[in-house]
Amino acid sequence: MKKVLFLFLLIPLFTFAQTITLKGQLTTGNSGTDIWEYVDEITGKVYAIVGGNGGMSIVDVTDPTSPVQIDFITSVPGFDVKVWSHYVYCSTSGGGTGFIVDIEDPTNAQVVGTFPSGHNIFIDDRGYMYNSSPGVRIYDLNPDPTSPLFLTQVGNGGHDVTVRGNLMIDCHGGSATNLYDVTDPSAPILLSSITDPTISYHHQGDISSDGNYLYINDELGNHPQADISVWDISDIANPVRVNETADPNSTPHNLYVIGNYAYSAHYSAGFRVFDITDPSNLVLIDEYDTSNTNGEGFTGAFGIYPSPVTGNIYINDRSGGGVMIFGFSELLSVEDKVNSFTFSVYPNPTSDKININAANFEINTISLFDIQGRKLEEINNLNILSNYELDLSKYNSGIYFINVNNRQTKKVILN
Protein backbone atom coordinates (compact mmCIF):
# COMPACT_ATOMS: atom_id res chain seq x y z
CA MET A 1 0.00 0.00 0.00
CA LYS A 2 1.32 3.43 -0.94
CA LYS A 3 2.48 5.55 1.98
CA VAL A 4 2.46 9.32 1.88
CA LEU A 5 2.91 11.98 4.53
CA PHE A 6 -0.32 13.97 4.80
CA LEU A 7 -2.20 17.06 5.97
CA PHE A 8 -4.98 19.50 5.08
CA LEU A 9 -5.93 22.90 3.54
CA LEU A 10 -8.62 25.08 2.06
CA ILE A 11 -9.84 26.99 -1.00
CA PRO A 12 -7.43 27.00 -3.99
CA LEU A 13 -7.45 30.40 -5.66
CA PHE A 14 -4.19 30.67 -7.59
CA THR A 15 -1.47 28.45 -9.02
CA PHE A 16 1.54 29.88 -7.17
CA ALA A 17 3.27 27.96 -4.39
CA GLN A 18 1.17 27.65 -1.27
CA THR A 19 2.83 28.99 1.87
CA ILE A 20 2.11 29.26 5.58
CA THR A 21 2.86 32.57 7.30
CA LEU A 22 2.84 33.32 11.03
CA LYS A 23 0.68 36.40 11.66
CA GLY A 24 0.98 36.60 15.44
CA GLN A 25 1.68 34.70 18.64
CA LEU A 26 0.78 34.91 22.32
CA THR A 27 3.03 32.85 24.57
CA THR A 28 1.71 34.20 27.87
CA GLY A 29 -1.67 33.41 29.32
CA ASN A 30 -3.78 30.31 28.94
CA SER A 31 -2.98 27.72 26.23
CA GLY A 32 -2.43 24.05 25.64
CA THR A 33 -5.59 22.29 24.44
CA ASP A 34 -8.48 23.13 22.10
CA ILE A 35 -9.06 26.42 20.28
CA TRP A 36 -11.94 28.02 18.33
CA GLU A 37 -12.99 31.41 16.92
CA TYR A 38 -15.75 33.87 17.76
CA VAL A 39 -16.69 36.91 15.65
CA ASP A 40 -18.68 39.56 17.52
CA GLU A 41 -21.68 40.25 15.26
CA ILE A 42 -22.13 43.78 16.61
CA THR A 43 -18.57 45.12 16.69
CA GLY A 44 -17.00 42.88 14.05
CA LYS A 45 -14.13 42.13 16.41
CA VAL A 46 -12.51 38.69 16.24
CA TYR A 47 -11.61 36.52 19.22
CA ALA A 48 -9.80 33.24 19.75
CA ILE A 49 -11.46 31.05 22.37
CA VAL A 50 -8.58 29.24 24.00
CA GLY A 51 -8.68 26.09 26.07
CA GLY A 52 -6.08 25.03 28.61
CA ASN A 53 -5.67 23.04 31.79
CA GLY A 54 -6.35 26.18 33.83
CA GLY A 55 -9.66 27.09 32.22
CA MET A 56 -10.91 29.04 29.20
CA SER A 57 -9.56 32.35 27.95
CA ILE A 58 -10.64 34.94 25.41
CA VAL A 59 -7.97 36.48 23.18
CA ASP A 60 -8.67 39.53 21.03
CA VAL A 61 -7.20 38.76 17.60
CA THR A 62 -8.91 41.55 15.66
CA ASP A 63 -5.33 42.56 14.87
CA PRO A 64 -3.84 39.07 14.48
CA THR A 65 -0.32 40.49 14.64
CA SER A 66 -0.94 41.67 18.22
CA PRO A 67 -3.14 39.15 20.08
CA VAL A 68 -4.22 40.25 23.57
CA GLN A 69 -5.81 38.05 26.24
CA ILE A 70 -8.79 39.99 27.63
CA ASP A 71 -10.25 37.39 29.98
CA PHE A 72 -9.28 34.12 31.66
CA ILE A 73 -12.06 32.15 33.35
CA THR A 74 -10.60 29.63 35.78
CA SER A 75 -13.95 28.45 37.16
CA VAL A 76 -14.72 26.36 34.05
CA PRO A 77 -12.86 23.43 32.44
CA GLY A 78 -10.93 24.24 29.29
CA PHE A 79 -9.90 20.90 27.84
CA ASP A 80 -12.29 21.17 24.88
CA VAL A 81 -14.03 24.40 23.79
CA LYS A 82 -16.61 24.90 21.03
CA VAL A 83 -18.63 27.98 20.06
CA TRP A 84 -22.30 28.10 19.12
CA SER A 85 -23.94 31.48 18.58
CA HIS A 86 -22.44 33.60 21.40
CA TYR A 87 -21.94 30.70 23.79
CA VAL A 88 -18.82 28.66 24.56
CA TYR A 89 -19.27 25.03 25.64
CA CYS A 90 -16.37 23.96 27.85
CA SER A 91 -15.66 20.33 28.69
CA THR A 92 -13.31 18.34 30.87
CA SER A 93 -11.14 15.61 29.41
CA GLY A 94 -13.95 13.23 30.33
CA GLY A 95 -16.75 13.00 32.90
CA GLY A 96 -17.80 15.56 35.45
CA THR A 97 -19.48 18.85 34.60
CA GLY A 98 -19.18 20.95 31.48
CA PHE A 99 -19.94 24.67 31.59
CA ILE A 100 -21.62 27.14 29.23
CA VAL A 101 -20.18 30.65 29.00
CA ASP A 102 -22.05 33.56 27.40
CA ILE A 103 -19.55 35.73 25.47
CA GLU A 104 -22.02 38.08 23.77
CA ASP A 105 -19.98 40.75 25.55
CA PRO A 106 -16.47 39.23 25.40
CA THR A 107 -15.21 41.73 27.96
CA ASN A 108 -17.79 40.51 30.47
CA ALA A 109 -18.15 36.76 29.92
CA GLN A 110 -20.68 35.03 32.19
CA VAL A 111 -21.16 31.37 33.16
CA VAL A 112 -24.83 30.67 32.37
CA GLY A 113 -25.28 26.88 32.42
CA THR A 114 -23.88 23.37 32.76
CA PHE A 115 -24.14 19.99 31.07
CA PRO A 116 -22.70 16.47 31.65
CA SER A 117 -19.18 16.69 30.24
CA GLY A 118 -17.48 14.35 27.82
CA HIS A 119 -13.98 14.21 26.33
CA ASN A 120 -14.87 16.00 23.12
CA ILE A 121 -17.62 18.31 21.85
CA PHE A 122 -18.81 18.85 18.31
CA ILE A 123 -21.70 21.16 17.35
CA ASP A 124 -23.20 20.75 13.89
CA ASP A 125 -24.75 23.32 11.57
CA ARG A 126 -28.24 22.64 12.90
CA GLY A 127 -27.42 23.36 16.54
CA TYR A 128 -27.04 19.78 17.80
CA MET A 129 -24.22 19.10 20.25
CA TYR A 130 -22.44 15.73 20.25
CA ASN A 131 -20.51 14.85 23.43
CA SER A 132 -18.20 11.90 23.09
CA SER A 133 -17.20 9.55 25.91
CA PRO A 134 -18.86 7.90 27.66
CA GLY A 135 -20.74 7.01 24.48
CA VAL A 136 -21.93 9.77 22.17
CA ARG A 137 -24.61 11.88 23.88
CA ILE A 138 -26.60 14.13 21.58
CA TYR A 139 -28.25 17.37 22.70
CA ASP A 140 -30.43 19.98 21.00
CA LEU A 141 -29.24 23.55 21.66
CA ASN A 142 -32.06 25.26 19.75
CA PRO A 143 -34.75 25.46 22.46
CA ASP A 144 -32.37 26.96 25.02
CA PRO A 145 -28.59 27.15 24.40
CA THR A 146 -28.02 27.55 28.15
CA SER A 147 -29.80 24.27 28.96
CA PRO A 148 -29.00 21.61 26.31
CA LEU A 149 -31.91 19.24 25.69
CA PHE A 150 -30.76 15.60 25.88
CA LEU A 151 -31.96 13.51 22.93
CA THR A 152 -30.18 10.15 23.02
CA GLN A 153 -26.94 8.25 23.58
CA VAL A 154 -25.22 5.74 21.30
CA GLY A 155 -22.44 3.43 22.43
CA ASN A 156 -20.59 3.31 25.73
CA GLY A 157 -16.95 4.21 25.09
CA GLY A 158 -15.75 6.70 22.52
CA HIS A 159 -13.29 9.54 22.07
CA ASP A 160 -14.04 12.16 19.38
CA VAL A 161 -16.87 13.07 17.01
CA THR A 162 -17.11 15.05 13.77
CA VAL A 163 -20.41 15.66 11.97
CA ARG A 164 -20.63 16.62 8.30
CA GLY A 165 -24.13 17.11 6.98
CA ASN A 166 -26.07 14.04 8.13
CA LEU A 167 -22.97 11.88 8.67
CA MET A 168 -21.58 11.42 12.19
CA ILE A 169 -18.00 10.17 12.38
CA ASP A 170 -17.66 8.51 15.79
CA CYS A 171 -13.97 7.81 16.39
CA HIS A 172 -14.43 5.36 19.22
CA GLY A 173 -10.92 5.06 20.66
CA GLY A 174 -9.56 1.55 20.88
CA SER A 175 -12.52 -0.14 19.25
CA ALA A 176 -13.61 1.36 15.90
CA THR A 177 -14.67 4.31 13.82
CA ASN A 178 -18.46 4.18 13.54
CA LEU A 179 -20.39 5.98 10.84
CA TYR A 180 -23.95 7.04 11.64
CA ASP A 181 -26.77 8.70 9.75
CA VAL A 182 -27.97 11.53 12.02
CA THR A 183 -30.65 12.95 9.75
CA ASP A 184 -32.75 12.54 12.89
CA PRO A 185 -30.28 13.27 15.71
CA SER A 186 -32.63 11.67 18.22
CA ALA A 187 -32.41 8.33 16.39
CA PRO A 188 -28.95 7.76 14.83
CA ILE A 189 -28.68 4.87 12.36
CA LEU A 190 -25.41 2.90 12.30
CA LEU A 191 -24.22 2.66 8.68
CA SER A 192 -20.89 0.86 9.15
CA SER A 193 -17.98 0.28 11.54
CA ILE A 194 -14.28 0.29 10.70
CA THR A 195 -12.37 -2.13 12.94
CA ASP A 196 -8.98 -2.39 11.21
CA PRO A 197 -6.56 -4.20 13.59
CA THR A 198 -3.63 -2.03 12.43
CA ILE A 199 -5.28 1.10 13.89
CA SER A 200 -4.27 1.32 17.55
CA TYR A 201 -6.51 4.22 18.51
CA HIS A 202 -9.29 5.76 16.43
CA HIS A 203 -8.75 9.32 17.62
CA GLN A 204 -10.45 11.78 15.24
CA GLY A 205 -11.44 12.01 11.61
CA ASP A 206 -12.99 14.02 8.81
CA ILE A 207 -14.20 13.43 5.25
CA SER A 208 -13.24 14.84 1.85
CA SER A 209 -15.45 17.62 0.51
CA ASP A 210 -17.11 15.23 -1.95
CA GLY A 211 -18.01 12.91 0.95
CA ASN A 212 -16.35 9.89 -0.67
CA TYR A 213 -13.22 9.56 1.48
CA LEU A 214 -12.67 9.35 5.22
CA TYR A 215 -9.42 10.20 7.05
CA ILE A 216 -8.78 8.56 10.43
CA ASN A 217 -6.05 9.80 12.81
CA ASP A 218 -4.34 7.09 14.86
CA GLU A 219 -3.01 8.92 17.92
CA LEU A 220 -1.24 5.80 19.25
CA GLY A 221 0.13 4.54 15.94
CA ASN A 222 3.90 4.16 16.32
CA HIS A 223 6.06 4.00 13.21
CA PRO A 224 5.85 2.07 10.91
CA GLN A 225 2.14 2.06 11.74
CA ALA A 226 0.15 4.58 9.73
CA ASP A 227 -0.49 7.99 11.30
CA ILE A 228 -3.55 8.51 9.12
CA SER A 229 -5.45 5.96 7.09
CA VAL A 230 -7.60 6.85 4.08
CA TRP A 231 -10.89 5.05 3.42
CA ASP A 232 -13.11 5.03 0.37
CA ILE A 233 -16.63 5.37 1.79
CA SER A 234 -18.49 5.94 -1.49
CA ASP A 235 -20.23 2.68 -0.58
CA ILE A 236 -20.91 3.72 3.00
CA ALA A 237 -21.84 0.19 4.09
CA ASN A 238 -18.49 -1.18 2.92
CA PRO A 239 -15.56 1.19 3.62
CA VAL A 240 -12.33 0.21 1.85
CA ARG A 241 -8.85 1.25 2.98
CA VAL A 242 -7.07 2.81 0.00
CA ASN A 243 -4.08 4.72 1.35
CA GLU A 244 -2.17 5.76 4.45
CA THR A 245 0.46 8.16 5.74
CA ALA A 246 3.35 7.33 8.06
CA ASP A 247 5.93 9.62 9.66
CA PRO A 248 8.42 8.43 12.31
CA ASN A 249 8.77 11.96 13.67
CA SER A 250 5.19 12.99 14.34
CA THR A 251 1.85 12.02 15.85
CA PRO A 252 -1.39 13.36 14.37
CA HIS A 253 -4.04 14.89 16.60
CA ASN A 254 -6.91 16.77 14.90
CA LEU A 255 -7.55 17.65 11.26
CA TYR A 256 -10.22 19.62 9.42
CA VAL A 257 -11.02 19.38 5.70
CA ILE A 258 -12.42 22.23 3.61
CA GLY A 259 -12.47 22.18 -0.17
CA ASN A 260 -9.39 20.62 -1.77
CA TYR A 261 -7.20 21.03 1.28
CA ALA A 262 -7.00 20.04 4.92
CA TYR A 263 -5.37 21.44 8.06
CA SER A 264 -3.78 19.33 10.78
CA ALA A 265 -2.28 19.75 14.24
CA HIS A 266 0.60 17.29 14.37
CA TYR A 267 1.90 17.61 17.95
CA SER A 268 5.72 17.95 17.86
CA ALA A 269 5.72 18.46 14.07
CA GLY A 270 3.41 21.46 14.46
CA PHE A 271 1.02 22.77 11.81
CA ARG A 272 0.81 20.97 8.47
CA VAL A 273 -1.18 21.49 5.30
CA PHE A 274 -1.94 18.86 2.65
CA ASP A 275 -3.44 19.06 -0.80
CA ILE A 276 -6.27 16.56 -1.26
CA THR A 277 -7.36 17.59 -4.74
CA ASP A 278 -7.12 13.87 -5.35
CA PRO A 279 -8.63 12.83 -2.01
CA SER A 280 -6.92 9.43 -2.12
CA ASN A 281 -3.48 10.98 -2.74
CA LEU A 282 -2.34 13.17 0.15
CA VAL A 283 0.34 15.71 -0.79
CA LEU A 284 2.20 17.76 1.81
CA ILE A 285 2.13 21.42 0.72
CA ASP A 286 3.72 23.24 3.65
CA GLU A 287 4.37 22.93 7.37
CA TYR A 288 5.36 25.11 10.29
CA ASP A 289 7.09 23.62 13.32
CA THR A 290 5.39 25.22 16.33
CA SER A 291 7.16 23.07 18.89
CA ASN A 292 10.61 22.78 20.41
CA THR A 293 10.09 19.02 20.77
CA ASN A 294 10.70 16.20 18.32
CA GLY A 295 9.53 12.67 17.60
CA GLU A 296 6.30 10.86 18.29
CA GLY A 297 4.35 11.83 21.38
CA PHE A 298 1.82 14.29 22.73
CA THR A 299 3.61 17.63 23.13
CA GLY A 300 3.29 20.45 20.62
CA ALA A 301 0.37 21.48 18.43
CA PHE A 302 -2.83 20.20 20.07
CA GLY A 303 -5.77 22.36 18.96
CA ILE A 304 -6.38 23.72 15.46
CA TYR A 305 -9.12 25.81 13.91
CA PRO A 306 -9.02 27.14 10.32
CA SER A 307 -11.49 29.98 9.69
CA PRO A 308 -12.64 30.68 6.12
CA VAL A 309 -14.48 33.72 7.48
CA THR A 310 -11.44 35.67 8.73
CA GLY A 311 -8.61 33.80 7.01
CA ASN A 312 -7.03 33.02 10.39
CA ILE A 313 -5.73 29.56 11.22
CA TYR A 314 -5.31 29.03 14.95
CA ILE A 315 -2.91 26.61 16.63
CA ASN A 316 -2.88 25.97 20.38
CA ASP A 317 0.56 24.59 21.23
CA ARG A 318 1.15 22.93 24.58
CA SER A 319 4.96 22.88 24.46
CA GLY A 320 5.54 26.61 24.88
CA GLY A 321 4.38 28.00 21.54
CA GLY A 322 1.10 29.17 23.05
CA VAL A 323 -1.57 30.62 20.77
CA MET A 324 -0.36 31.05 17.19
CA ILE A 325 -2.30 32.73 14.38
CA PHE A 326 -1.35 31.73 10.84
CA GLY A 327 -2.27 32.72 7.34
CA PHE A 328 -2.13 30.51 4.30
CA SER A 329 -1.86 31.69 0.70
CA GLU A 330 -4.93 29.70 -0.35
CA LEU A 331 -7.03 31.00 2.55
CA LEU A 332 -6.94 34.75 2.07
CA SER A 333 -7.40 37.22 4.85
CA VAL A 334 -10.40 39.53 4.98
CA GLU A 335 -8.23 42.41 3.75
CA ASP A 336 -6.89 40.40 0.82
CA LYS A 337 -10.37 39.24 -0.13
CA VAL A 338 -11.62 42.81 -0.47
CA ASN A 339 -8.86 44.13 -2.78
CA SER A 340 -11.23 46.76 -4.29
CA PHE A 341 -13.88 44.12 -5.00
CA THR A 342 -17.20 44.63 -3.26
CA PHE A 343 -20.75 43.31 -3.27
CA SER A 344 -23.99 43.96 -1.43
CA VAL A 345 -26.64 41.66 0.03
CA TYR A 346 -30.31 42.50 0.56
CA PRO A 347 -32.67 42.22 2.28
CA ASN A 348 -30.59 41.65 5.38
CA PRO A 349 -31.97 40.30 7.71
CA THR A 350 -33.96 37.94 5.50
CA SER A 351 -36.45 35.15 6.11
CA ASP A 352 -35.75 33.02 3.04
CA LYS A 353 -33.95 34.47 0.00
CA ILE A 354 -31.18 37.02 -0.37
CA ASN A 355 -30.00 39.01 -3.39
CA ILE A 356 -26.30 39.31 -4.11
CA ASN A 357 -25.13 42.23 -6.24
CA ALA A 358 -21.48 42.83 -7.16
CA ALA A 359 -22.05 46.14 -8.99
CA ASN A 360 -19.75 46.13 -12.05
CA PHE A 361 -17.88 42.97 -11.07
CA GLU A 362 -18.58 39.53 -12.47
CA ILE A 363 -19.86 36.96 -9.96
CA ASN A 364 -18.16 33.61 -10.49
CA THR A 365 -18.32 31.76 -7.17
CA ILE A 366 -20.61 32.05 -4.15
CA SER A 367 -19.89 30.19 -0.92
CA LEU A 368 -22.07 30.01 2.19
CA PHE A 369 -20.61 29.41 5.66
CA ASP A 370 -22.21 28.95 9.05
CA ILE A 371 -21.13 30.93 12.12
CA GLN A 372 -18.55 28.27 13.00
CA GLY A 373 -16.84 28.62 9.63
CA ARG A 374 -18.12 25.40 8.08
CA LYS A 375 -18.90 25.60 4.37
CA LEU A 376 -22.55 24.71 3.74
CA GLU A 377 -22.63 25.09 -0.02
CA GLU A 378 -20.66 26.44 -2.97
CA ILE A 379 -21.93 27.54 -6.38
CA ASN A 380 -19.30 27.73 -9.12
CA ASN A 381 -18.98 28.91 -12.73
CA LEU A 382 -21.76 31.50 -12.52
CA ASN A 383 -20.11 34.18 -14.70
CA ILE A 384 -22.91 36.70 -14.25
CA LEU A 385 -22.93 40.51 -14.13
CA SER A 386 -26.29 40.95 -12.44
CA ASN A 387 -28.10 40.02 -9.26
CA TYR A 388 -27.99 36.46 -8.01
CA GLU A 389 -30.78 35.25 -5.72
CA LEU A 390 -29.61 32.71 -3.13
CA ASP A 391 -32.25 30.54 -1.48
CA LEU A 392 -31.63 30.17 2.27
CA SER A 393 -35.03 28.72 3.16
CA LYS A 394 -33.66 25.27 4.01
CA TYR A 395 -31.42 26.64 6.77
CA ASN A 396 -32.29 27.36 10.40
CA SER A 397 -32.47 30.89 11.75
CA GLY A 398 -29.08 32.28 12.67
CA ILE A 399 -25.99 34.07 11.42
CA TYR A 400 -24.31 33.05 8.17
CA PHE A 401 -21.50 34.36 5.98
CA ILE A 402 -21.57 34.73 2.19
CA ASN A 403 -18.28 34.84 0.30
CA VAL A 404 -18.18 35.93 -3.34
CA ASN A 405 -15.35 35.03 -5.73
CA ASN A 406 -13.23 33.96 -2.72
CA ARG A 407 -12.47 37.67 -2.24
CA GLN A 408 -14.92 39.23 0.19
CA THR A 409 -17.23 37.96 2.94
CA LYS A 410 -20.40 39.53 4.35
CA LYS A 411 -22.58 38.56 7.29
CA VAL A 412 -26.22 37.59 6.74
CA ILE A 413 -28.89 37.25 9.41
CA LEU A 414 -31.59 34.66 8.69
CA ASN A 415 -34.77 35.11 10.71
Image (spheres, helix red, strand yellow):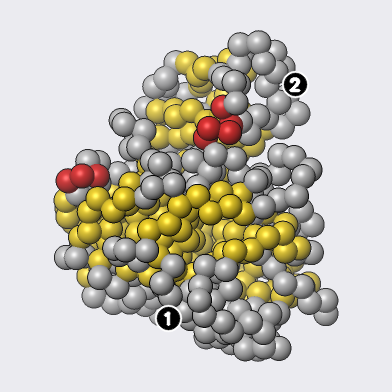
380 displayed left or right of 134: right
Q: Which residue is mark 2?
A: 383
Q: Which quarter of the figure has residue 411?
A: top left
- The reply to whether residue 93 is in sight is yes
Going by the numbered disc 2, the residue's amino acid type is Asn
158 displayed left or right of 12: left
Measuring 43% from the left and 57% from the top, which residue is drawn there? 25
Kindly indicate whether the residue at mark 1 contacts the one at mark 2 (C-beta within 8 angstroms): no
Looking at the rendered structure, the secondary structure element under dot 1 is loop
Measuring 17% from the left and 46% from the top, which residue is drawn there? 108
Looking at the rendered structure, the secondary structure element under dot 2 is loop
Measuring from the top left, give residue 341's x and y in whole percent: 60, 21
Q: Which residue is mark 1?
A: 157
With respect to residue 377, does 51 lie above or below? below
Q: Quadrant of the C terminus?
A: top left
Query: Neighbour class for label 1 at 10 Å: few (<14), some, many (≥20)?
Result: some
Measuring 28% from the left and 77% from the top, which residue is drawn there? 95
Query: Neighbour class for label 2 at 10 Å: few (<14), some, many (≥20)?
Result: few
Going by the numbered disc 1, the residue's amino acid type is Gly
Measuring from the top left, give residue 177's x and y in whole percent: 57, 75
Q: Quadrant of the N terminus?
A: bottom right
Mark 2–mark 1 Cα distance, whole angstroms, equals 50 Å
- The reply to whether residue 140 is in sight is no
Measuring 49% from the left and 33% from the top, which residue is drawn there? 401
Nearest to the observer: residue 149 or residue 224: 224
Residue 57: numbered disc: none
Measuring from the top left, give residue 118's x and y in whole percent: 34, 71
Measuring from the top left, give residue 152's x and y in whole percent: 36, 64
Q: Earlier in the sequence, mark 2 or mark 1?
A: 1
